[in-house]
Image (tube, coloured by chain):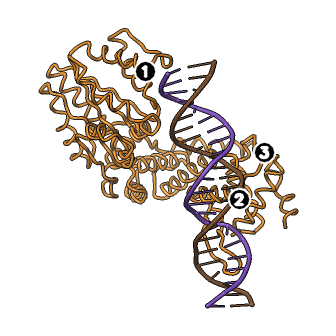
Chain colours: A orange, B purple, C brown
DNA sequence: ATTCCACAGGAAGGGCGGGGTT
DNA sequence: AACCCCGCCCTTCCTGTGGAAT
């Protein structure tokens, strides 16, 4: 017994000892990492550089609107170009400040203005509290602080659509016109968005001044993703740990999902992590498929976890029907079970009309399949199927306090209904 | 050709919470 | 603090409909 235990431990340690280390520098595969070169973005880099170059001649550059889907390199390219500009302008003795704000976090006018003022706090000795001041006070302060000396200020508003949807375009109006009120400094705005439609929300005046110039980032195709991954892989992994097929497979899988480079990098990283954990000496195609599976599962789990209460109850009634072998079910059946569950949990049930919409939502999220079918004489309804395993759903609910009562309920409910 | 099931899904409006305004 | 406005969630009421059954 003891002997057995000993060899078992030995084998564990040996496995890890023998296993070649996989990652040389995992940071390179993170989204936040800015590589030294950006493959297949030469055109966008040049356009941006061309737009910003007036700075070096002491002229105000145009405002820019940058758009493209997620994972097309917008943010990283803008950061890259603005960094380069900062370096070069230093040589020319022209002060350039680049203020990068992600509007998903900095999501109100006030916060945007306050963040800009606070960016200069070391220089001005001023700091605006995160709440409390009237917005126009902050705006005045902002002008003072910026205009304290001659310089260029480039304000990058990432995910600008989030800001506009939440708090309107007033702030853009102010920022794009601020130059008329400044004597020393010059400001230009770079707006980044992955939602092109949001332009419709903008006041035409704002739109015309923000999109004086536009830079479009098309999705990457599989070959381009492969180049990107190759470049990063050289930095991230030790030599020869990647099987030849790994990078092309990651690229192909990510290309299938609208050419998202983030997705591709995640795949590559997770593949490596899985190989590492298995104690494998090489990352192979097999690990990539596992990574693909894991990422899908993780996002699905996250989606289910954050569902509102009634959607969770609704999902659970479909799970019960599935366990009972009653899928596909129609809307009426599902609604009946749902009502029972609400009753059991002492929750007021929603109407069938509303549940019908929630079913559609679950369908769009890919958790269930709901197809409208006509059963002739027997009416028109949805055929509802489950797209995840009941086990998975239960496992997620196990950690949700408010759903505890549901877990032991299955058999009782089923008996009462059928 | 007609009927009729079992819903789908549009329209309108109530209630409510969060943000901005006065 | 009082107020208002907007977006969101939900209900009520409603008309529409594909196709098996008759």
The subunit letter for the residue under badge 3 reads: A
Question: Which residue has dot 2 on it?
Answer: A352
User: Residue B6 is drawn in which quadrant?
Assistant: bottom right
> Which quadrant of the figure contains the N terminus of chain A?
top right
User: Residue A184 is drawn in which quadrant?
Assistant: top left
| Neighbour tally class for label 3: few under 14, some 14-19, many 20 plus, Cα within 10 Å | some
What's the CA distance linking mark 1 and mark 3? 46 Å
Question: Which tag, 2 or 1, sits closer to the chain's start?
Answer: 1
The subunit letter for the residue under badge 1 reads: A
Residue A219 at x, y = what percent?
Answer: 34, 53
Residue A214 at x, y = what percent?
Answer: 25, 44
Residue A152 at x, y = what percent?
Answer: 23, 23
At a point 48% along the width and 19% down the height, the residue shown is: A130
Question: Which tag, 3 or 2, sits closer to the chain's start?
Answer: 2
Q: Which mark is residue A135?
A: 1
Secondary structure beneath label 1: helix
What's the CA distance linking mark 3 and mark 2? 24 Å
Of A410 and A142, the residue lying toward us: A142
- Asked whether residue A244 appears in the rendered view, the answer is no
Q: Are labels 2 and 1 on one chain? A: yes
Looking at the picture, does residue A327 appear above or below residue A242? below
Residue A68 at x, y = what percent?
Answer: 34, 48
- Asked whether residue A376 appears in the rendered view, the answer is yes
Question: Which tag, 1 or 3, sits closer to the chain's start?
Answer: 1
| Neighbour tally class for label 1: few under 14, some 14-19, many 20 plus, Cα within 10 Å | some
Looking at the picture, does residue A257 appear above or below residue A177? below
The mark lying in front, picked from 3 and 2, is: 2
Looking at the picture, does residue A353 appear above or below residue C22? above
Q: Are labels 1 and 3 on one chain? A: yes
Looking at the picture, does residue A317 appear above or below residue A181? below
The mark lying in front, picked from 1 and 3, is: 1
């Amino acid at each position: 017994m003891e002997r057995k235990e000993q060899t078992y431990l030995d084998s564990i340690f040996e496995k890890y000892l023998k296993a070649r280390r996989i990652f040389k520098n995992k940071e390179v595969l993170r989204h936040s990492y800015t590589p030294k070169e950006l493959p297949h973005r030469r055109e966008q880099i040049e356009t941006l550089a061309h737009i910003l170059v007036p700075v070096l001649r002491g002229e105000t550059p145009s405002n820019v609107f940058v758009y493209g889907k997620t994972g097309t390199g917008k943010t990283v390219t803008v950061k890259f170009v603005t960094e380069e500009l900062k370096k070069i302008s230093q040589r020319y003795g022209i002060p350039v400040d680049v203020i990068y704000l992600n509007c998903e976090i900095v999501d109100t006018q006030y916060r945007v203005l306050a963040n800009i003022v606070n960016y200069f706090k070391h220089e001005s000795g001023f700091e605006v509290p995160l709440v409390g001041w009237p917005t126009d006070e902050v705006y005045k302060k902002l002008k003072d602080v910026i205009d304290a000396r001659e310089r260029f200020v480039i304000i990058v508003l990432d995910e600008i659509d989030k800001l506009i949807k939440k708090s309107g375009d007033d702030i853009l109006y102010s920022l794009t016109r601020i130059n008329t009120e400044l004597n020393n400094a010059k400001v230009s705005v770079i707006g980044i968005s992955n939602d092109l439609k949001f332009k419709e929300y903008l006041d035409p005046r704002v739109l015309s001044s923000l999109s004086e110039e536009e830079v479009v980032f098309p999705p990457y195709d599989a070959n381009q993703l492969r180049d990107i991954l190759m470049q990063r892989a050289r930095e991230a992994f030790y030599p020869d740990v990647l099987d030849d097929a790994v990078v092309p497979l990651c690229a192909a899988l990510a290309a299938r999902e609208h050419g998202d480079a983030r997705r591709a990098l995640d795949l590559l990283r997770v593949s490596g992590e899985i190989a590492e954990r298995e104690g494998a000496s090489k990352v192979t195609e097999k690990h990539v498929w596992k990574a693909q599976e894991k990422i899908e599962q993780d996002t699905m789990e996250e989606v289910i976890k954050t569902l509102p209460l009634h959607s969770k109850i609704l999902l659970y009634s479909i799970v019960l029907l599935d366990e009972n072998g009653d899928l596909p079910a129609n809307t009426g059946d599902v609604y009946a079970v749902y009502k029972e569950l609400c009753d059991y949990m002492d929750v007021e049930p929603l109407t069938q009309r509303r549940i019908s919409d929630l079913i559609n939502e679950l369908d769009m999220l890919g958790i269930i399949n709901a197809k409208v079918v006509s059963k002739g004489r027997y009416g028109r309804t949805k055929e509802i199927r489950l797209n995840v395993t009941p086990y998975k759903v239960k496992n997620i609910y196990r950690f949700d306090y408010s759903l505890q009562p549901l877990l032991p309920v299955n058999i009782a409910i089923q008996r009462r209904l059928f």
